[in-house]
Amino acid sequence: MKYILKINDVTETVNCSVGKHTFSFPQPLAIKKAKAALRKGNNLTVDATTIESKAFGTSSQKVSTFKKVPKDLEPFWNEYTPPVNQEHADMMSFIHNDSVALRPSLLMLPDLKWKYLIRSAMRGKNIMMTGAAGSGKTMAAKALANSLDRPEFYFNLGATQDPRATLVGNTHFSKDSGTFFSESSFVKAIQTPDAIILLDELSRAHPEAWNILMTVLDPGQRYLRLDEAKDSPTIQVAKGVCFIATANIGNEYTSTRVIDRALLDRFTIIEMDLLSKEKEESLLLQMFPEADKDMIANIASIVSATRDEMKTEIPRISTSVSTRASVEFASLCYDGFSLEEAASVTVYPLYDDAGGLDSERTFIKQLVQKFIPANTDENLFNTESEEELFTEDDINQSS
């Protein structure tokens, strides 16, 4: 294989081999192997077409053999800089340096996870985002498509009753045309180069949808079969298409299924965490910059307290308040509703009121009561006997 060597500021073309083997590797690897061969005592043979160098002899002496690197070759050998894969270098620079600036300010996603998303999309990988409802999974997927200026397609697999119609298409009949097949929008989506396709609520999807997606998501196949028959036509997934699935995983979510392991193996999984108190407050302040800051801080504290309670060994509630509910909570307060009024339609309905004083609803009311200003007439409990049961000590203990 020919290489370009610069010796004494003269660029020459040479063939380089060690022993019986001529290196047909990229130049940096060839040089590395040649060095290793010389250290083992093998000969280095340089075949030069025309070279003005004592190391290679005259132009008529085209082949020279060395036991060690000649001095005329040392500048090249020692100062050689391997060529850079510029395309890869540009991608790495974008992922690790430039991409963070493209993340929307309202998407409270850590830098590392955002970079994972960017890298997976640029590599055409499949991504599954898991996490609690309202943790920003769908928002992150849409932000990714917008940031990369990619075509975006959305499919809610948890809502479809006919997976084959949604993912493949339908057979129709008309008097004029007879029987004909109509492709689904999913078929069109997978044929769109560099598209980002969001498969929402995958954990709620019918198992038939999972079976259809198996070959689509498999990096070694990447095709959609239009019929269950082996010889049926197939549609190839276009180059650069990235699939992003979302899933709610946990006992608190009804109608979800344990996703097949073979399907999970086709995804890079990114966990979407609920926000900390500080990030929740920062998000709400960005969304409602004119809102009362104390009110926003109280909402963030209430929401965060439910999440902390869920982490205890024996939580007294069955679920936490999501960021989606938190935003609506703050929105109502910003529009003039009191803290208790807003909580009554955004927070209380999440919790069971069975059990009286020991119910989840009572616990949440105690928590909200703690953040109601003392100089207001708001009270969450209807009777005097109930009021007497919830002392300040009780409220402090519950929070």
Image (cartoon, rainbow, N blue to C red):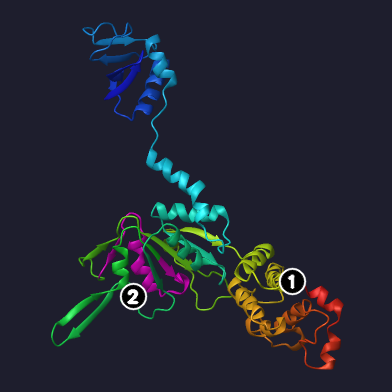
**Horizontally, is 298 left or right of 210 in the view?**
right
Q: Vertical placement of 232 versus 178: above or below?
A: above
Q: Quadrant of residue 314?
A: bottom right
Q: Mark 2 = which residue?
A: 166
Q: Which residues are magenta?
A: 198-226
In space, the residues marked 2 and 1 are separated at their CA atoms by 47 Å
Q: Mark 1 = which residue?
A: 294
Report x, y in % for residue 39: 43, 16
At 30% from the left and 25% from the top, the residue drawn is 23
Q: Nearer the viewer, residue 35 or 387?
A: 387
Q: Is residue 221 at all visible to an observer of this figure? A: yes
Q: Which residue reaches farthest left?
A: 176
Does 399 appear in magenta? no
Q: Is residue 40 at all visible to an observer of this figure? A: no
Type of residue at label 2?
A: Thr
Secondary structure category for the residue under label 2: helix
